[in-house]
């Protein structure tokens, strides 16, 4: 009985509610009355807590009267039933989420949870918002680090506990030369050009003379790192180990913050997500998302390649539910003030609209998502980037009923899955700004290191704003927490696909030349296929 009581309390606490003795007793009595098995308790309480939240007069301290009303509504059969066996309609569960419409959730150190930002967000930002963006990045990852088994040992005494280092702050270094510390902060350069580790309390210069090699991953200025070392009389930290923070799985994060609606499309519980995932596997096993990158519309062979792709779809009766077209949509940038190139740029999109519209079944059935690349014309040139200018894509809008002009990055919510699409030459940018990497790294290692770095950092662009400017008040749109189901890192670099901590990451390659390579993502398997 005690275990059941703890489950009840845990579920309601997740939704921000506390239970009094009467409410707790009432819920325990319900479980007994309906003979709910121990393994079904959490599911039942998730439903009760969610329905309680929907009541207009729901309070933080759970009201017995409101609970009674929720239970009576359930008894009268107002809920569920027919929906359980309704046919899944992918179109009703597909959302393309604009980065500028995502709600901003900031980490509150006082309450140890996420709080929604108050007031409208602006593109201009302030000095405070830039500081807040970096502080949020650090705090979101730090709470994961402190929850990790290696940094939150059991309270019971053990030999392992004696060997574990506690996370310290730079302010605790003062006057403790000769001691060993484990610090967490951002890699940055001081005014003198020395590599330092900075946290909210200060910074310390790093001495790498005794470090044989860092752990796996790419270390750039702006990365958040765990650094272990000895504090010296000179006021430097003699580094003996450096590594990226541990990555937290999506399931773990969602089990804690399942009530937070990070995407602005409604929060779902883990149990609901599992049920949806099972149904997608069974009922939508053949459904695919095609992802193409570097669709150079100024090259005639590109439209021929698209026609060949559509012809194959029609011949094999295999119509993808989504086709993501990532930029650049031109092989060369458009020189400023060059009217002829601007007109040609628009004509290329008009030609694309005509090609797609010549396949009526694909036009009606497929959702097209257009993601701008670094060379494309948008309202801003910093991340997140706004969609393609509407003046260039008017024919696409008029001829395609299911076309979405997305931001870069954007997110696709499909049932319980979150798919992030990001078009940036990320590998070259990271390699140009390295401050540390394992020696003798091979090409396959670089791909793996890039994926590890991006997911461990929980950020699509883990560098300083001097390397890649971003809009401070929209920095949360680059955040990868909770971990998405899949991440598309569309890049000029070699294509790859791998799964790390349950998150599938892939680069679809470039839809150029004679090969016209692209990737097909299968939501039922949460994996991609190279085509």
Image (cartoon, rainbow, N blue to C red):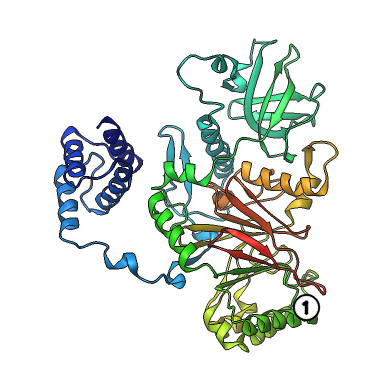
234 left or right of 17? right
470 left or right of 118? right
Q: Position of residue 165 (x, y in %)?
A: 60, 19
Q: Position of residue 155 (x, y in %)?
A: 45, 19
Q: Is residue 65 above or below residue 335?
A: above
Residue 125 appears anywhere in the view: no
Residue projecting furthest to the right: 440
Q: For the residue labelled by badge 1, is the local secondary structure a helix, a strand or a loop?
A: loop
Q: Is residue 168 above or below residue 469?
A: above
Residue shown at 55%/32% (left/top)?
145
Residue 82: quarter of image = bottom left
Q: Position of residue 115 (x, y in %)?
A: 42, 43
Q: Position of residue 423 (x, y in %)?
A: 68, 60
Question: In the image shown, does 43 or 93 lie closer to the viewer?
Answer: 43
368 left or right of 530? left
Residue shown at 79%/76% (left/top)?
338
Residue 380: quarter of image = bottom right
Which quadrant of the rendered structure holds the N terminus?
top left
- Numbered marks: total: 1
Question: Disc 1 designates what residue?
Answer: 298
Residue 169 appears anywhere in the view: yes
477 left or right of 214? left
């Amino acid at each position: 009985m005690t275990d059941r009581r703890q489950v009840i309390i845990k579920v309601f606490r997740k939704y921000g509610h506390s239970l009094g003795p009467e409410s707790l007793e009432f819920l325990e009595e319900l479980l007994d009355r309906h003979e709910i098995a121990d393994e079904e308790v959490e599911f039942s309480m998730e439903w009760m807590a969610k329905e309680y939240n929907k009541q207009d007069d729901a309070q933080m301290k759970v009201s017995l009267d409101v609970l009674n009303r929720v239970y009576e509504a359930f008894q009268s059969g107002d809920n569920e039933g027919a929906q359980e066996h309704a046919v899944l309609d992918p179109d009703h569960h597909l959302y393309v989420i604009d980065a500028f419409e995502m709600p901003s959730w900031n980490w509150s150190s006082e309450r140890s949870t996420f709080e929604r930002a108050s007031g409208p967000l602006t593109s201009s930002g302030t000095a405070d918002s830039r500081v807040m963006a970096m502080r949020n990045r650090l705090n979101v990852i730090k709470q994961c680090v402190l929850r990790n088994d290696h940094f939150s040992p059991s309270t019971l005494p053990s030999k392992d506990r004696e060997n574990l280092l506690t996370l310290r702050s730079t302010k605790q270094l003062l006057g403790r030369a000769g001691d060993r510390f484990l610090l967490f902060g951002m890699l940055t350069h001081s005014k003198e050009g020395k590599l330092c580790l900075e946290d909210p309390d200060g910074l310390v210069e790093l001495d790498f003379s005794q470090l044989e090699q860092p752990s796996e991953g790419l270390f750039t200025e702006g990365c958040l790192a765990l650094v272990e070392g000895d504090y010296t009389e000179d006021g430097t930290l003699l580094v003996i180990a450096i590594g990226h923070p541990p990555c937290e799985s999506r399931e773990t994060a969602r089990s804690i913050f399942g009530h937070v609606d990070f995407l602005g499309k409604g929060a779902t519980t883990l149990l609901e997500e599992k049920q949806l995932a099972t149904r997608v596997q069974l009922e939508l096993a053949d459904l695919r998302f095609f992802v193409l990158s570097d669709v150079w519309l100024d090259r005639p062979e590109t439209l021929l390649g698209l026609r060949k792709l559509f012809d194959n779809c029609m011949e094999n009766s295999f119509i993808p539910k989504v086709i993501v077209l990532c930029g650049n949509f031109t092989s060369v940038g458009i020189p400023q003030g060059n009217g002829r190139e601007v007109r040609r740029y628009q004509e290329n999109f008009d030609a694309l609209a005509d090609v797609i519209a010549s396949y009526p079944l694909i036009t009606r059935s497929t959702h097209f998502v257009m993601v701008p690349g670094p060379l494309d014309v948008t309202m801003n040139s910093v991340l997140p980037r706004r969609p393609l200018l509407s003046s260039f894509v008017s024919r696409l809008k008029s001829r395609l009923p299911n076309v979405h002009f997305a931001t870069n990055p954007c997110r696709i919510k499909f049932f319980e899955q979150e798919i992030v699409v990001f078009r940036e030459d990320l590998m070259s940018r990271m390699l140009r700004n390295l401050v540390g990497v394992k020696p003798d790294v091979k090409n396959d290692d670089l791909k793996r290191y890039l994926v590890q770095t991006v997911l461990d950092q929980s950020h699509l662009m883990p560098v300083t704003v001097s390397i890649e400017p971003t809009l401070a008040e929209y920095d949360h749109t680059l955040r990868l927490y909770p971990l998405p189901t899949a991440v598309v890192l569309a890049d000029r670099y070699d294509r790859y696909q791998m799964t790390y901590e349950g998150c599938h990451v892939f680069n679809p390659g470039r839809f150029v030349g004679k090969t016209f390579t692209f990737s097909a993502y299968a939501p039922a398997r949460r994996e991609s296929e190279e085509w």
